[in-house]
Amino acid sequence: PTESVKTIDGTEAFKTKAEPFAIADPTLGKIDPDFDPDKVPLLTLLFEIEKPSTGFSQCATLSSSFSTMRGGANDSGGNNKQLHPDERVIEALQHSLFCASLFESMRAEIIPLTASNAPSATSTQQKGQKSVVWLSSEMEESFLPPPSVMAGEDTSKSGEARLLCVVHCHEGEVKVQLDDEYSLTVKLIEAGTAAAAASAESSGIDDHSNKQQQNDVSDGPGASGSQTPSQLRTLCRALLLHSQSLYHEHRMKMRQEQLSSEKKEHMPLMGFARVKKQVMTPSPHILQSCVGLGCKFIFEKKVRVVLKALSLWLAQDMKCEDKIVVEWLPLALFDSHSRFAFIYRNLCMDIGIYGDVLRVTQICDTGEFKTVAFGSDLELEYFLKLEIR
């Protein structure tokens, strides 16, 4: 909507009122007769985990707050109220901008920003080149080693400093190798339009997850690999939540640093004039942290299966009455590593899982420590059997 105003020189000017649809319009404050809310796309973030050898995949999308309130009409407490169409549009637009910014932050870990967009582009690009290796194939039949080995990663690094093995990187899609079995794809997809968000309670953001659940039955047994379909879907949702939390923490930290720098600029000058330093924006390493966390979840599941099979092997094949004692360290779910103690008779080992790398520290009879690293659950199984024998 517009309104006419008489100016001092007698000419007639027009003003455009800022309504919710106009927030997404780049010509805000100008007359745009061709503006159509049906053509304003809303974006959301999608995480997909795929097993390349079988083509099986599971995915999850990041839902906005208004889409999660569509079932709140029956709430007895009355906390979830029906939102006005304009408010739904604003929340949908905020969610779309958040997803776009989060995706660009992850994509910048692979392809750094240009010098015109980032003040520290030179140093960032150098770090990005050292932390990324590009793959020509993602199939298991190519006998690829663990991604950390291909990228030349130091196994002593934490999960947030992991190196990435990139399959491809496009404008709206990034695909990296999660481990030697699965790949992770991050997509920025359309989830309806602004007009649809204003007229409907459901934005259709969860359509991908619903379709994936319906297609689970059609996939053959073993197509999902070492993880079940429900475990892969849960892992997608966990990585989405983890990336969102990391981005929020990063933005809050940058906001605090910006406020402190502004206070320093307004301080009275003492002696020599202050020279304004160029602010270096550190990378939050969201994609690297998600890859490390996903590897840890998958590797830990495989290790638990190995420990269970090892107990059955001792009881049935070796006819041994002594049992294995495994004590897991109670760490947070989103911690970058897992750790447990393995005890059998006089054998005592401290085993840690760091992404797709497993380190075993053993106390020898002489009191010395012996450390060895493995990249697969099969190597760990053979090692433990040799030590037990």
Image: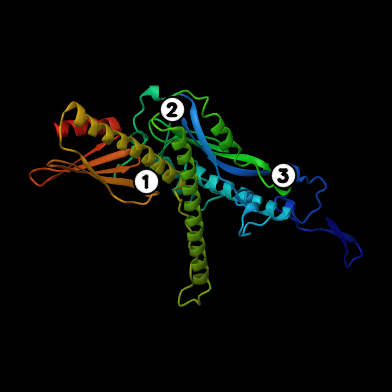
Quarter of image, res 323: top left
Q: Secondary structure at mark 1?
A: helix
Q: How far apart are labels 3 and 1 at the CA level?
A: 40 Å
Q: Counting other residues with Cα less than 10 Å from the Cα at mark 2, is it few (<14), some (14-19), or many (20 or more)?
A: many
Q: Earlier in the sequence, mark 2 or mark 3?
A: 2
Residue 243 x/y as whole percent: 48, 48
> Is 292 situated left or right of 73 in this image?
left
For the N terminus, the quadrant is: bottom right
Residue 196's disc number:
3
At a point 87% along the width and 65% down the height, the residue shown is: 7
> Is 388 situated left or right of 377 in this image?
left
> Is 173 situated left or right of 132 in this image?
right
The answer, for residue 187, to whether it is visible in the render is yes
At a point 53% along the width and 51% down the height, the residue shown is: 118
Q: Is residue 264 above or below residue 119?
A: below
Quarter of image, res 177: top left
Residue 241 x/y as whole percent: 49, 48
Q: Counting other residues with Cα less than 10 Å from the Cα at mark 1, is it few (<14), some (14-19), or many (20 or more)?
A: many
| Circles 2, 3 touching at the beta carbon (< 8 Å) | no
Residue beneath disc 1: 159
Residue 143 x/y as whole percent: 35, 24
Residue beneath disc 2: 138
Q: Is residue 65 above or below residue 381?
A: below
Amino acid type assigned to the residue bearing label 2 in the image: Glu
Q: How is the image coloured?
A: rainbow
> Is 208 situated left or right of 8 in this image?
left
Residue 153 x/y as whole percent: 33, 40
Amino acid type assigned to the residue bearing label 1 in the image: Gly
Q: Earlier in the sequence, mark 3 or mark 1?
A: 1
Q: Secondary structure at mark 3?
A: helix
At a point 55% along the width and 33% down the height, the residue shown is: 212
